[in-house]
Each structure stands twice: as structure tokens, then as C-alpha cells.
Image (cartoon, rainbow, N blue to C red):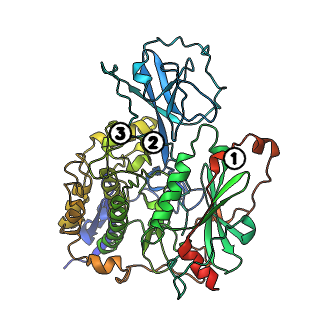
Amino acid sequence: MDRRSWVGRLFDFIGESVLVYALAPAAAGLNLGSVASVNKVYPNAPTHETGPGQGDDRSIYRRGARRWRKLYRINGHIFQAKRFNRRAFCAYCHDRIWGLGRQGFKCIQCKLLVHKKCHKAVNVICTNEHNIDNILGDDRNEQTLHIIVDTPPPKPHFQNSYPRDPIKPPIETPSELIATEDSNVICDDGEFTGKRQYSLSDFNLIRVIGRGSYAKVLMVELKKTKRIFAMKVIKKALVTDDEDIDWVQTEKHVFETASNHPFLVGLHSCFQTPSRLFFVVEFVRGGDLMFHMQRQRKLPEEHAKFYAAEISLALNFLHSKGIIYRDLKLDNVLLDHEGHIKLTDYGLCKEGIRLGDTTSTFCGTPNYIAPEILKGEDYGFSVDWWALGVLLYEMLAGRSPFDIAGASENPDQNTEDYLFQVILEKTIRIPRSLSVKAANALKGFLNKNPLERLGCGGTDCFTEITTHPFFRSVDWELLEQKRIVPPYKPRLDSDRDLTNFPPEFTDEPVHLTPDDPNIIKQIDQSEFEGFEYVNPHLMTLEDCV
């Protein structure tokens, strides 16, 4: 038999590799013109190992969640949902605009103020001039992207009710909001003896572990117990302009709901200063799946199945509590010290959704946004199962299902609009290397029709997933009890080991900028009344120390 004298791999345009080799008689046909002077396959080295190099495809790197605030157009007006802290009166019915959430609409051109319930009945043509009497000062500039919705004419008989889904502007939170394991321990007597409040002086600030547009995340030590937590710090000034307090309350509520679930990051406590809000949450030491995927490139099917199954349990729990997660991505899937997953970052969650209910807020991380959101349709829990399909594809294939060959070299294909077009129109190609069961699971989750999507078929949707051939080997009861050994255990030297966190965060100095008295004077502190919280299950442990 002829001996192989040359072996290599060829990659097709979707990134799949094929092993090729040349036998000795044919080797002469493989002539190299000259020895290459570069010693790397990819000449554009990234600035840091968790970021892309020049010309690289950015789809496998960290991308923050986005929010798009809807604009409603009628009679020339372009209305935007607003929340007014002072007196404001509706130009249509002349009643005061008040209530939780954004109950008012404001024309961004002529500044006309109306109730959300009244905006469809406005028959005054927009003058495009700022001359309306009930303006309460100019809005500050904001970076929010906008989606314009053509509002249909009002019905003959006005319905005195509010729309079902007040638009909540979710916050982009750092992907490294990290979490503590074994948090649901209580004293032997099971009693909670007191509900003290925490303050910044109760914690030692150790290291920065994450940062986003609105928040910084620190690793901290509770002085009394020496336990390690993550502390999310948000400046009030960033949420009292046009940002709404609603997302803060939503994130807090979901943290409270998640506190006793094995696969969700829970809340220790909340407190505030005149300038900042503080969430103290569990610290998960193993880093996130994004960090590990950037080193592993792709995972074996059994590993991906394990993570997808635990994520499914977490999503099903949130859905059972009426919560759409809306921001599932590699960055938000954390690994604990044993290798189990925990979901984090609840800034995009939508509460109060029952089976069959829908919402319409346009939000998410671009690569993971479901087609029904992009179409402007009402949606429900289906968007989370779509995102799981995208994430499962990334784990199995090592790339996004929406990668475009040569996109990094074509500016027209490197835009968000083009990505959305691809999500809506492109036929998703399943890698040939995957098993039939894995391919069918991906096709099920990534069905562009939410009514036919895996996990979305009726009253017992979750059973569709647990009985799917890809997941049939999973013992779901043992999995939920964390009695199945994870396929990978992070290497950790101590409970303060930060090996699994990006150095661009951990190398940052730990400090909070001094308060500016002039900025604090402008903050309406009444907006944050009742923010303080202490998790009684965690406090029972600390009271016993």
C-alpha cells in the first residue's frame, strides 16, 4: 500500500472541514512557490483573546443586548412611550397622565403629550413645532434605537383600556454577572431572626469581573462571613433620564424568583446610596460558556446536550412563573465550580405572561433574536426556544448559524439590518458532521414558524423537548437534582480564582468614582423607594455564623 506523504484539511464556505491527503506518486503535483513568511493561519491577531482581530467575523464574540424603543405614528405625530415624574396632562382627554410604567405618549416632534390609551384617538395633525403648553421640559439625548410602527386608525368606539404590554426599556448588563453556589442553606431551626439591611460598608471590593453600558460588576467579600459574591453597581443617573425604573424592578423580581433554583443565579440582597443601586448576587466561579467556547471552538454532542438540557430546565422554570427570558446567549450561561450551568442577567425579562399571552417589545441580542420579533409580531415563550437553538448550534458547530462567508470583507454584509435579513430569509445549513438526532433537534428549535417550533406545540410544550430523540437519553429527574456529573469541571484553585474571567475586566482597578453633588440633586430619590431587599434564605445562614 502506498504510504501517505502529505495530509491536510480543506474548509468549505460554511466552515466544515474535510481531511485530504496525497499519496507519494502524486506528491510531486503539490509544489509550493515559496515558504510563507507568516507563522500564523490568521494574520490579524485580536487585541485580546476574547475579542476579534481586524477583519474577523464578530459573531463568535461578545455582543451586548440591545433595546429598540418603539415609535407610534399617527396623523404625522411620532409618539414615544414616556414615564413622567411630574404633573402632565393629556391633550386629548385632559386627565392627568399617571400610573406605573409608561402610561404617557409624547410626540418627539411637536412634544404633544397624551395617554397611551388616547394616542389612537388624536385627530390633530402634527405641527412639527415645539409649541404645546403641557411640555414638562426637554428630554435629554438618548442612544436608543427606534422602530416606527404605523398605528391604525382608532376604532369607532374608544376602548378605555391600556395596551397589554407597556414597553420596558431593558438594560444591557455585562455578560459576566456572575454567581455563589449552595445558597439555599438555612439554620437548623429554620427560622429567620431578623431582616437587617446591608450597605456598601459591609463588603470588601476585590476585583472587577464585568462591565456594560449601564453597570459594573465586582467580586466582593461579605466582611461578616468572608463569603464571596458578585455585586452589580448601577448609577441612578443612568436610569432616571429617559430610562425607566421598571426594568430595575423586573430584574429584582426575577432575581428573587430565581434564588432557589439550581440553574438560575439568585439574589443575596439589594441596597442603595444616593448615587447608585447595588445588586448582590451569587458568584459563579467557572466563567461563562462564551469564555470556554472561545477556547474549545466547539463541543462534543454529549457535552452540548448536557448544557442544553440544564438550560431547558431553567427556561421551563421561568416560563412556569410567567417570565420570558429574552436574552439567552453564551455570555449569560455560567458554569459553577462543579460544571453545572446557571443563567444570569435578567434585564430583558418580561413578567406576567401566561400560556397563550403575548408581548411585543423589540429587544434582544442581535444574533439570537427570533424571526417573530424581527417581523414585529406579538410573541410568547417561543423566542426563548429559538435562542436555545442558536446557542445549541454554536456549541455543536463552533459558529453562528447566521455566519456569512466573506461578510468581514464586505461592509454591506456587516450590518445589523443585513443580519436580521439573514435570520428571516436564510435557510440554515446543519453541519454534516452532526448526528441525525442532533440535526433534528436544531431543525426543531430553529423553525422560523413559532407555532411549529420545538417546545411550542400546545399545553405540554416542555414534554416535546424531554421526549425528543436527541434528549431521550437524559434522566431529567436526576438532572434537575444535579446528580448527573457534568462533562467538564472548571479548574479552580480557590473560591477567588479568576482564571475563567476575561483579563480586560479583572485587570481593571477597583474603585467607584466619587459622587457629584450636582448630579445627585437632580435624581428623584422617590423613584427608588423600597429597593432594599435581603434574601431570608441566605440571611438565616449568616445569622448562624
* Farthest bottom residue in view: 188
Marks 3 and 1, the one that precedes in the sequence = 3
- Give me the residue at 50% from left, 24% from top: 114
Residue 157 in the figure: left or right of residue 126: left
Task: Examine the rendering and report whether any part of residue 289 can be seen.
Answer: no
Q: Is residue 475 above or below residue 169?
A: below
Screen quadrant of the C terminus:
bottom right
Screen quadrant of the N terminus:
bottom left
Instruction: Name the front one of labels 3 and 2.
Output: 3
Q: 329 or 236: which is nearer to us?
A: 236
Q: Which mark is residue 525?
A: 1
Residue type of the residue flagged with mark 1:
Gln
Task: Examine the rendering and report whether any part of residue 71 can be seen.
Answer: yes
Cβ atoms under marks 3 and 2 closer than 8 Å: no
Residue 158 rendering spot, x and y as whole percentages: 35, 23
Marks 3 and 2, the one that precedes in the sequence = 3
Q: 253 or 90: which is nearer to us?
A: 90
Residue type of the residue flagged with mark 3:
Leu
Secondary element under disc 3, as helix, strand or loop, is helix
Cβ atoms under marks 3 and 1 closer than 8 Å: no
Secondary element under disc 2, as helix, strand or loop, is helix
Residue 247 rendering spot, x and y as whole percentages: 52, 48
Q: Which mark is residue 409?
A: 2
Q: 415 or 146: which is nearer to us?
A: 146
Secondary element under disc 1, as helix, strand or loop, is helix
Residue type of the residue flagged with mark 2:
Glu
- Give me the residue at 65% from left, 26% from top: 136
Residue 295 rendering spot, x and y as whole percentages: 47, 68
Q: Residues within 10 Å of mark 1 (few under 14, many from 20)?
A: some
**Alpha carbon distance from label 3 to label 1:** 37 Å
The residue to which callout 3 is attached is 374
